[in-house]
């Protein structure tokens, strides 16, 4: 192959490093980028301690005694996650001491180590899709940003995303600066989905995925080129166009839809995949109207 594009976190980074160093194929975004995003501890320490990005307070633990001490230190509510990335699996919000046993067991089901993170009273949770590729005008690496994507999670799983997410100028500047710095640290070319919490003008780093992301599926409806198109273009060194063409929203669905009823919603679309939840999409003149439409699409369950 000319390029190897890992689309999951659970990859053998030693093999990827050997392939990259031998020149056999290019690894997207890079072997180092893949290694950093396999484990939350490596990524969080790189972001916070090396790059100086603001993050929530966190602790990594591998014993129940240390876990209980971390929960007591960070306070409740706090969020408990596997130390390895798990696409939302194993996430628990600990609101009282009675939640601790289940949170520990839930996180340990996917990893031997556990991350405890202080809960942030944020205004928004967002993703900034960041594209690194060759600028045809200069022949050098450059960075492009898609408009911010707002989203809502419940129990670690995405419920809904929309684009654009309105931010004030200071928050937007901070978000783009953070996205550029972490994507530069990963290296290489391709799209990175940088997740953040926004509280007023302040932006806190949450995580980064070095490939298209579930919240970025909204770009199938909102942008001239979706996140998947942009990833391919970046890897191949083709021109990048991150233009937003319409406000829109996206919602995953797991149920059997009544397609006739779902697609009767104005400006709607539905996508089905073999191994993933279906995707409901809608556009409108405003984000609020698009979100209302996508909920109607995803709610058109066959009775």
Image (tube, helix red, strand yellow):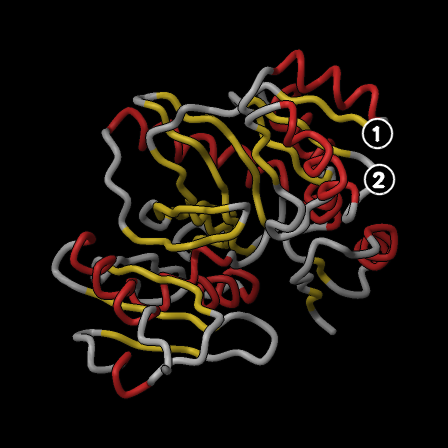
Q: Quadrant of residue 276?
A: bottom right
Work out whether 283 lies above or below 162. below
Label 1: which secondary element:
loop
Query: Which mark identifies residue 127?
Result: none
Label 2: which secondary element:
loop
**Place of residue 3 in the rendered image (x, y in percent of width and height, measured from the top left):** 69, 67
> For the image shown, how many numbered marks are present on the structure?
2
Q: Assess disc 1: are there few (<14), some (14-19) or many (≥20) residues with their C-alpha within 10 Å of its C-alpha.
A: some
Task: Provide the residue designation for mark 1.
Answer: 62
Left or right for 247, reference 97 = left
Question: In percent of the image, x 76 and y 55: which residue is there?
Answer: 10
Left or right for 97, reference 270 = right
Question: In percent of the image, x 57 and y 34: which residue is there?
Answer: 93
Question: In percent of the image, x 47 and y 47: which residue is there?
Answer: 154
**Place of residue 234 in the rendered image (x, y in percent of width and height, measured from the top left):** 51, 60
Choose the circle earlier in sequence order: 1 or 2: 1
Q: CA distance from mark 1 to mark 2?
A: 6 Å
Quadrant (top left, top right, bottom left, bottom right) of the C terminus: bottom left
Q: Which of the pair 303/193 is nearer the observer? A: 303
Q: Which of the pair 96/26 is nearer the observer? A: 96
Question: In percent of the image, x 87 and y 57: which residue is there?
Answer: 15
Task: Provide the residue designation for mark 2.
Answer: 112
**Place of residue 269 in the rendered image (x, y in percent of width and height, measured from the top left):** 31, 77
Q: Are marks 1 and 2 in contact (CB under 8 Å)?
A: yes
Left or right for 69, reference 182 = right
Q: Assess disc 2: are there few (<14), some (14-19) or many (≥20) residues with their C-alpha within 10 Å of its C-alpha.
A: few
Work out whether 137 lies above or below 202. below
Quadrant (top left, top right, bottom left, bottom right) of the N terminus: bottom right
**Place of residue 20 in the rendered image (x, y in percent of width and height, measured from the top left):** 79, 55
Residue extending furthest toward the front: 98
């Amino acid at each position: 192959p000319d390029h190897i594009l890992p689309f999951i976190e659970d990859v053998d980074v030693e093999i990827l490093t050997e392939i990259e160093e031998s020149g056999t194929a290019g690894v997207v975004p890079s072997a180092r980028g893949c290694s950093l995003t396999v484990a939350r501890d490596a990524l969080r320490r790189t972001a916070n301690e090396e790059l100086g990005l603001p993050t929530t307070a966190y602790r990594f633990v591998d014993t129940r005694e240390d876990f209980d001490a971390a929960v007591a230190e960070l306070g409740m509510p706090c969020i408990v996650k596997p130390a390895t990335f798990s696409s939302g699996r194993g996430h628990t919000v600990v609101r009282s001491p009675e939640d601790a046993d289940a949170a520990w067991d839930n996180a340990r089901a996917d990893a031997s180590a556990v991350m405890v993170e202080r809960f942030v009273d944020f205004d928004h949770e967002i993703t900034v899709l960041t594209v690194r590729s060759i600028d045809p005008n200069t022949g050098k690496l450059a960075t492009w940003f898609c408009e911010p994507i707002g989203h809502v999670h419940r129990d670690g799983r995405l419920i809904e995303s929309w684009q654009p997410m309105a931010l004030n100028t200071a928050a937007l500047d901070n978000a783009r600066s953070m996205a550029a710095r972490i994507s530069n640290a990963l290296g290489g070319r391709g799209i990175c989905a940088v997740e953040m919490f926004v509280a007023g003008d302040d932006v806190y780093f949450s995580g980064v995925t070095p490939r298209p992301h579930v919240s970025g599926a909204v770009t199938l409806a909102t942008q001239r080129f979706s996140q998947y198109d942009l990833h391919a273009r970046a890897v191949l060194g083709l021109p990048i166009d991150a233009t937003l063409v319409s406000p829109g929203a996206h919602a995953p669905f797991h149920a059997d839809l009544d397609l006739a009823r779902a697609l009767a919603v104005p400006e709607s679309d539905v996508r089905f995949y073999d191994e993933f939840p279906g995707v409901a999409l809608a556009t409108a003149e405003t984000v609020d109207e698009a979100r209302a439409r996508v909920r109607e699409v995803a709610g058109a369950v066959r009775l």
